[in-house]
Image: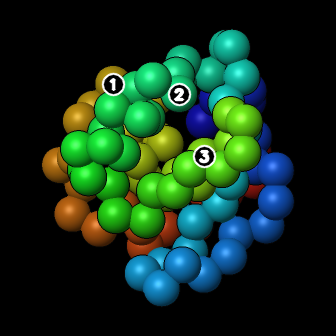
Amino acid sequence: MDETARPTEPPEPNGKGLIGVVELSRGSGLSPGTIRYHLERGDWPGLRVGRGQQWRVPRTVLEALQRGDDPAKLKEPARNVLDMV
């Protein structure tokens, strides 16, 4: 997992599973525009927008993005917990 995508608060329940807050930084390879695009399409259950550039992202979605996979194909992306980096 990229060291520049780091949790900023502990995971919390969202009704479907546990997710964490990820702060996107320049070297993370994750852009707010990419996340916003998929969020608007409704691809990721459990993905929520935070203040500034903080996004609530399931661990499986984060990993899929970093690999370049299509996270929309994940069956249950909100069930995992974002690990400490």
Residue shown at 79% from the left, 67% from the top: 10
As measured in the structure, the alpha-carbon distance from the residue carrying label 1 to the one carrying label 3 is 18 Å
Which quadrant does the N terminus fall into?
Answer: top right
Residue highlighted by disc 2: 32
Is disc 3 placed on a helix, strand or loop?
strand
For the point 72% across and 45% down, which residue is it? 51
Q: Residue at x 33, y 32 (%)?
A: 37
Other residues around mark 2 within 10 Å, as few (<14) / some (14–19) / many (≥20)? some
Label of residue 55 in the image: 3
Q: Quadrant of residue 18?
A: bottom right
Q: Quadrant of residue 26?
A: top right
Quadrant in which the C terminus appears: top right
Give me the residue at 36% from left, 45% from top.
39
Answer above or below: position of 44 versus 15.
Answer: above
The residue type indicated by label 2 comes to Pro
x and y, in percent, of residue 58 in the image: 49, 57
SS for dot 2: helix
Spot occupied by residue 53 in the image (x, y as percentages of width and height): 68, 34
* 36 to the left or right of 71: right
The answer to whether the residues at label 2 and label 3 have Cβ atoms under 8 Å apart is yes
Q: Nearer the viewer, residue 53 or 29?
A: 53
Q: Secondary structure at mark 1?
A: loop
Q: Amino acid at mark 1?
A: Gly
Which mark lies nearer to you, 1 or 3? Answer: 3
Q: Earlier in the sequence, mark 2 or mark 1?
A: 2
Query: x, y (%) of residue 14?
Result: 54, 78
Mark number displayed over residue 68: 1
